[in-house]
Image (cartoon, rainbow, N blue to C red):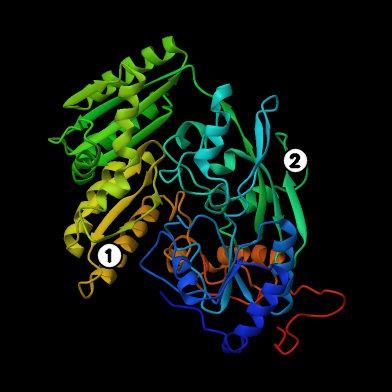
Amino acid sequence: MKALDIDQSIMARRREIVAALRAIIPGEAVIDAEIGRRPYESDGFTAYANLPLVVVLPSTTAELQAVLRYCYANAIKVVPRGAGTSLSGGALPLVDGVLISMMKFNKIKEIDFENRCAVVEPGVTNAAISRAVDHRGFYYAPDPSSQIACSIGGNVAENSGGVHCLKYGLTTNNVLGVEMVLMNGEIVRLGGAFLDAEGYDFLGLVVGSEGMLGVVTEVIVRLLRKPESARALMIAFDSSEAGGACVADVIAAGIIPGGMEMMDRPAIHAAEDFVHVGYPLDAEAMLIVELDGPPVEVDHLVGLVEAIALKRGATQCRISNSEAERLAFWAGRKAAFPAVGRLSPDYLCMDGTIPRKALPRVLAGITELSEKHKLRVANVFHAGDGNLHPLILYDANKPGELQAAEDFGSDILRLCVEVGGVLTGEHGVGVEKRDLMPVMFNEIDLDQQIGIKCAFDEKMLLNPGKVFPTLHRCAEMGRMHVHQGQLPFPELPRF
């Protein structure tokens, strides 16, 4: 991974910058000691780490505005950060940049049951929203595996999904509006507590923009009624290809499960050793399929899915008969990532999405790539919407294994694009997939995306080095923001 050049003039002004930030936010909200900055050096993509120049924890929008205005005026790069659970390096700090942690923005400001929405700050955890509305029979649908820790602001940045995104959508389908502070300190509100906003869909741009367009300070989320009932099937197969074919058959039959997850043998064994819920250890692949809705409909759909699975050669089919049993089926899937961590000192969690019909081909291809790169892999993924999460096992202490794991991951993502899929489903591009963007997009595509970035952040100070393989200047895009008659960076040649 090619790193950004370090701005030595910023490094030389570090004490001055820290002092200026302390004048803006007094107390302990500015962290400059090395031991205090160390916990922020990486996110969930731990293969890479940078010690940030300084860490700032604003607690109000006014404080955030002041910090961004100072950094804008002094051309200092900024990296916004939520809970740090990103698996693509989206919150990887910069040595010459200010890291802004949004975790003091942790209040649920309003719950509006009549209009089925809630107003929350970005540091509120995903699961906390559902807990806050559970007593009235509501919940927030997107449920990443890290939902007890990940923040709603991070979910907005990465357009996170989860087990139930097949039927209920990703973050973009469940966010109605945001308040956001731009790099120059301006506040904008996009969307609102209603279904459709007039004009361009700027909200659609912001959700999934990976902290490159602005810093979100408030999110309006959609609340859903909890289904009347839910039942799950645990289905075993003697091959991943058979399991993948079953997934395609279920969807082709017009059935949209609440959740449809798949795990292969290594993941099954790791999860069972971790939670002991009775997973089929002799299976090569296992599906967990959840149907929800009115009880009569759920019972009918359970029978249809069971028949489809048996037709595809399922070797075992268990159906939950109680809420406790349903939750037990899901316990291992929810704990799969930490469980797999017991199999190897390190692993890379990949994230690519493919057409469902390509599941058998891609799973077979991953097996071949495992042999090619001589590294083990455990597959855990959202089978219903084709969002793969291969976990590549390696040991960073062995020379060359990290590079081999990265090469393996790149080959998987190339395969995803080859079969008509995309580089990411919910983890974002970050630094992990940045240099693979030309595999999916041509130069014109990338220039258009960078042009949007320039419209929001003409100095390219917000989260630079992420997503785009080559960092352009806005002047190179044929456009330059003029503010009060002055061009920024007058020393640069104009094109």
- At numbered mark 1, what does the secondary structure look like: helix, strand or loop? helix
Residue at the left extreme, as displayed = 282
Residue 405 is marked as: 1
Residue at the top extreme, as displayed = 296
- At numbered mark 2, what does the secondary structure look like: helix, strand or loop? loop
In this rendering, the answer to whether 455 lies above or below 158 is below
Q: Residue 15 in the image: x percent, y percent? A: 62, 84
Q: Which residue is mark 2?
A: 197
In this rendering, the answer to whether 111 lies above or below 353 is above
Tell me, yes or no, if residue 136 can be seen here.
yes
Q: Residues within 10 Å of mark 1 (few under 14, many from 20)?
A: many
Q: Is residue 271 or residue 367 the one in the foreground?
A: 271
Q: Is residue 386 or residue 465 the one in the foreground?
A: 465
| Marker count (numbered) | 2
Query: Which residue is pictured at 28% across the width and 62% down the height?
Result: 408
Q: Residue 139 in the image: x percent, y percent? A: 54, 30
Q: Residue 52 in the image: x percent, y percent? A: 52, 74
Q: Is residue 22 left or right of residue 48?
A: right
Q: Residue type at mark 1: give it.
A: Ala
The image quarter containing residue 495 is bottom right
Q: Is residue 123 or residue 455 the one in the foreground?
A: 123
Query: Which residue is pictured at 43% across the width and 56% down the height?
Result: 423
The image quarter containing residue 297 is top left
